Image (cartoon, rainbow, N blue to C red):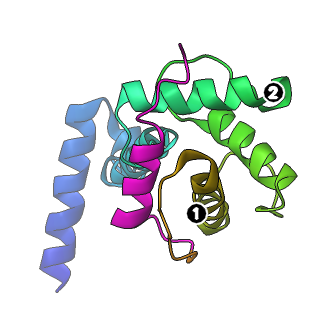
Amino acid sequence: MRALTKALVSVTAAVGIAAGGLATAGTAMAAPAPVQRQAVSGEVTTLAVVNLGLNTTRAKHWQCYLRNVGPEYNPGTIDGQLGTNSWKAAQRLFRDLDFYNDSIDGVVGPNTITALQRFLNWIDQYTGDDYNLAVDGKAGPATKGAFWDFNGRNFCA
């Protein structure tokens, strides 16, 4: 066991010296931690846009719909990327329709999905669509399909 420990220390020291000096020998093995943090932050960046199955064109339609409903629901840049500003605008609309009672944070969690489901079920009386979604807070195929269908209309025209 002692021989194995000596060998590991020697290898670590050699790696540290090769990487830039003996001072880094002890930290050479700690490199994976920053790499893991970078990977996590990369995932957060990826998840910052939640289009719920919409392509860029249909996501633009949703953004235009929000903007057209009123200035208080302006999602910002109409770019087809449903990020924090788009979802904050949607949450404000859902709140004003009494479909949402959580913080306006732009995070697409179960409460936002529940509000979206309520909205889609409510809006079908005006569109003639029959979504009849289960209000369960899960962005399953039925919810994504109804959201896709609703945004098939060009609200940007």
Whether residue 114 is visible here, answered yes or no, is yes
Q: Residues within 10 Å of mark 2 (few under 14, many from 20)?
A: few
Question: Where 25 sits versus 154, above or below?
Answer: below
Magenta segment includes 135? no
- Residue 112: image x %, image y %? 65, 59
Q: Residue furthest top?
A: 157
State the extent of the magenta-drawn residues as a range.
137-157
| 88 left or right of 16 in image | right
The residue at the point 67 percent across, 61 percent down is 115
The residue at the point 53 percent across, 13 percent down is 157
Element type at marker 1? helix
Query: What is the number of callouts on the image?
Result: 2
Question: Where 120 sits versus 50, above or below?
Answer: below
Magenta segment includes 141? yes
The residue at the point 38 percent across, 40 percent down is 54
Q: Amino acid at mark 2?
A: Gly
Q: Amino acid at mark 1?
A: Gln
Of 62 and 79, the residue lying toward us: 62
Image quadrant assignment for residue 1: bottom left
Mark closer to the chain start, 1 or 2: 2
The label number, if any, that marks residue 117 in the structure image:
1
The residue at the point 55 percent across, 24 percent down is 155
Element type at marker 2? loop
Mark 1 and mark 2: Cα distance apart in space = 21 Å
- Reading the image, the residue beneath label 2 is 70
Q: Residues within 10 Å of mark 1 (few under 14, many from 20)?
A: many
The label number, if any, that marks residue 130 in the structure image:
none
Question: Is there a contact, CB below 8 Å, between mark 1 and mark 2?
Answer: no
| 116 left or right of 45 in image | right
- Residue 68: image x %, image y %? 71, 24
